[in-house]
Structure formats: C-alpha cells, structure tokens
Amino acid sequence: MRLRWYRRAHRWIGLASTLVVLVVSATGVLLHHPGWLGAAGDDLVLLASTADGALLRVAPGILERSDDGGVSWQESPLDLVPTRPVRMTVSTDGRAIWLVGDDGLLVGDATGTLWELGLLPALEGRAIMDLAARSADHATLLSNTGAWTTEDGGQSWSPSWQTDRDAGRLLSLIHGLHTGHLGGAALMLVYDIAAGGLLILVVTGVVLALRGKKRQSGGMPCRGQLDPPGPS
C-alpha cells in the first residue's frame, strides 16, 4: 500500500514540476520575442506636463501638444523629434523640458513651444537608459554602462562614472535568477514549490528503486532450489 502511494506521489509531483518547467521555458521564449504577442514597440509614447498646464506626448518622430487635458492633440511642426525616444522629463527647477532618444536630444522651454537641438555623448553603441535634469543647462544622462553630465544644455558632455558592463550585468542576472529575486515574490514562491517538488521526486524515486530491487531479489528462487538433486 505504501509503495503504491510513493508511485502515485512520484507521478503527480513529476507532472506538476514538468508543467512549471514548461511554463517557465515557454514564457522565456515569448519574452525574447514580444512581437509574437502583439506587444507595442514603436507605438509607445512619452508624456510630460508643461508649466502652463498643457500635456506633451512623444511617439517616434512625432511631438504633440494638448491644452485640454488630452481630449485633443495638435502635432508640432518640429522635425527633429527622435525616432527612438527614450525619456522626456521636466527639469527640477521647472524651467526646461528635456527629450532624449537613441538618435537625438532636444531641450525645450517650460511651455514646450521652443526647442533647441542638443548633442549626445559618444555612447559607442551603449544604450540610453534615463535622463535627469536640474535646469535647461544641467542634466545627467544614464546609459547601461555609466553616466555623462552636461553643463551647457547638451552641447558637450563629460563622463561621471562608468561600470564594467559585462561583469556587472552578468553577475546581477545570475544572482537574480538563482535567488528568484529577478521576478519578485511570485518567482521566489515558484522556485520554492519547484524545489520542494524536486526533493520529493528524488526521495520517492530512491524509495521506488530500493523497493523494486528488494522485491526482485526476494521473489527469485535461488539456484539450489531450481536444480534437481543429482544421482547418488
């Protein structure tokens, strides 16, 4: 009876753990190809509020303004809007709006009506991650390997700090995957359940192997019992 319970537990826990592995693998592939799910890519927009209460939104190559809280929009004739926008932010002093993309930089006044073209630092293939601005002159640009600072409205940049991109990102990724922290509490719970299931699989597998071996050795008669007695 106990052997049957071990077999049943082994079978169902193995099936459940297999389903978890399949889900993790399938979602991992889909995350690598978000276009398969119809995920928005180039249509994503950035949004900011101006000093005069208007709203600005940016899509690839398009800057629009709304004076009625987003009910209607008017496109700006500006033809220097980045085609790959990353960040639009109002400076902390409220007197400037910074718009940065992988292929361009614009610095506007508080109302978002007058814009000046800025220059990007020599990123050399690095990805722009974020931008923080104090005024129309001072801002810090963050990439995936470090940061640059400008004091003249984006006309020149100086490096602030740099990181080891390969070592840091790889270590962080491996640590997050190993601990489950990469996906928060939900992923950690899945890891705990899967780990518990694997432990039970190992225990029930060992028990089944030992019981099966014992049954085979106990059920087979020895050779002396099979051979008939020879002539005296």
Image: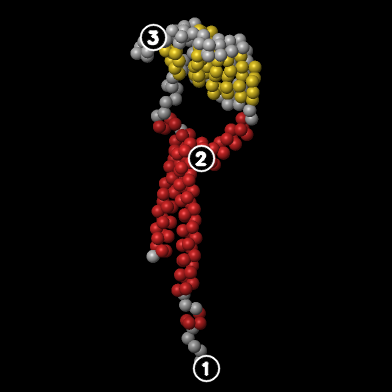
Residue 59: quadrant of the picture: top left
Q: Residue at x 50, y 19 (%)?
A: 87
Which of the marked residues, 2 or 1, is nearer the chain's N terminus?
2
Q: SS for tag 1?
A: loop
**Residue 72, horizontal then vertical, whole percent:** 35, 12
Res. 75 visible in picture: no
Q: Is residue 203 visible?
A: yes
Question: If you read the primary sequence from the N terminus, does the residue marked by circle 3 or circle 1 appear first?
Answer: 3
Q: Which mark is residue 148?
A: none
Point out the tag, 3 or 2, that comes first from the N-terminus: 3
Residue 5 position, x and y percent, is 40, 60
**Cα–Cα gap, marks 2 and 1:** 75 Å
Q: Is residue 211 positioned above or below 46 on the image?
A: below
Residue found at x 47% / y 77%: 221
Numbered circle sitting on residue 180:
2
Residue 144, compared with residue 62, is above or below; it is below
Question: Residue 232, labelled with which disc?
Answer: 1
160 vs 31, nearest the viewer: 160
Find residue 67 and name its label: 3
Q: Nearer the viewer, residue 158 or 224?
A: 158
- Residue at (55, 10) in percent of width and height: 136
Mark 3 and mark 1 residues within 8 Å of each other at the beta carbon: no
Q: Disc 2, disc 1: CB below 8 Å?
A: no
